[in-house]
Amino acid sequence: MSPLNKAERAELLSALEGWALLPDRDAIHKRFVFDDFNAAFGWMTRVAMVAEKLNHHPEWSNIYCNVNVTLTTHDARGLTRRDMELAHYMNEFAAGLTVEQE
């Protein structure tokens, strides 16, 4: 899988609410805020099952109700369609569960 070019990246990212390019690396980031730890962990579990199917695993951390996510494709050394696809699933699974998305 090859990294997205500038036009592909802009087009695909515009369809992903709340995701932003990181200034210091070829990756996207988003912070999800849930009602509580249980909601955050449940969402992470659901995402983990899809990530395993896609064989594409996020960089993420969880502190209580906050989940910070960074997506990049290490093998391709940059953003690929896999990152955008996983970000889409994350947004879809978080719909109605999150208090705030940054």
Image: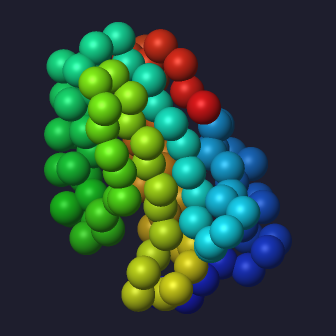
The residue shown at (56%, 79%) is 78
Residue 65 appears in the picture as rendered: yes
77 shown above or below 58: below
Tell me residue 42's x, y (percent).
19, 28
Q: In the figure, is residue 77 to the left or right of 20?
A: left
**Quadrant location of residue 22?**
bottom right
* Looking at the image, residue 24 lies above or below residue 28: below
Residue 30: percent from left, percent from top: 54, 43
Q: Is residue 89 above or below residue 59?
A: above
Question: Would residue 8 appear left or right of 92 to someone viewing this image?
Answer: right
Residue 19 versus residue 52 in the image, above or below? above
Circle count: 0
> Depth check: 44 or 63 in front?
63
The residue that appears at 35% across and 11% down in the rendered structure is 35
Residue 47 position in % (x across, y down): 27, 44
The residue at 21%/50% (across/down) is 48
Q: Quadrant of the C terminus?
A: top right
The residue that appears at 38% across and 29% down in the rendered structure is 66
Q: Position of residue 7 (x, y in %)?
A: 81, 71
